[in-house]
Amino acid sequence: MRLSRMAFSRIGLVMLPVIVMGCPLLAQSPIPTARGMSSDHRYEVAATYMHVLTDASFGRSLGLNGFTASASAGVLPSVQVTGEVGSYSGSKVAVKSFLAGPQVGFHLYRFQPFVRGLFGLSHTNVNSQSQGSAFTIAAGGGLNFLLTDHFAIRALQADYYRPMGGMYRSADFLRLGFGVSYQFGSR
């Protein structure tokens, strides 16, 4: 019994310095954790592939494919101002949008959920003929998954997208997408 207590004590004496010296190394992880629940970076740029499901505004339901590019700047710890440019097309219909508005998010370990409301203009072409521009809102959110301190995968983005006015009397679209995000700058 003394031998096993003595062996246990020696193992404990060897492991104690390893544990004490290893804890600060773990605390310097390159992935942001739940410090203050806000991002450590002031700016973000993202590229997102989008699939837009339309209602019967174009005579029948359509699926448009395209991309958005967005840039965000932090104004408060959890609040950003976001600008977005999008282009979607399919079945002789093309929609381009220019939107901006607030985005609120936080992060918990590697996950960064966000919600946002964007407002601006969208321009529609049908059969290469301009159908005019309309005031547009996009309300929704998404989830970024951090790979490193700067790069993230936009695992999901979902928005209710509504152009109003012009040829749109009651258009209701759904945008679904995924992409990549780069975050930089310090607060």
Image (tube, helix red, strand yellow):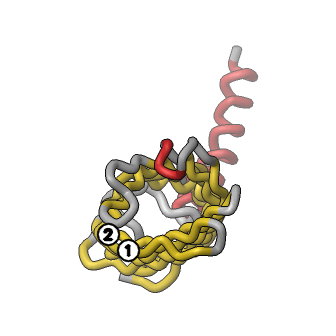
Q: Residue furthest top?
A: 1
- Image quadrant occupied by the C terminus: bottom left
Query: Where residue 94 sits: x, y (%)?
Result: 60, 67
Tell me if label 1 and label 2 are in contact, CB under 8 Å: yes
Q: Residue furthest left?
A: 76
Amino acid type indicated by mark 2 = Phe
**Is 126 above or below relative to 71?**
above
Q: Quadrant of residue 104?
A: bottom left
Residue at (32% x, 53% y) in the render? 169
Residue type beneath disc 1 = Leu
Label 2, on which residue? Answer: 135
- At x 46%, y 85%, the residue is 185
Expressed as whole percent of the image width and height from the top left, the position of residue 184 reads 51, 81
Q: Which of the numbered marks, if any, corresponds to residue 52?
A: none
User: Which sits in the foreground, 1 or 31?
Assistant: 31
The mark tally for this picture is 2
Sequence-first disc among 1 and 2 = 1
Q: Is residue 93 visible?
A: yes
The numbered disc on residue 121 is 1
Q: Residue at x 43, y 71 (%)?
A: 122
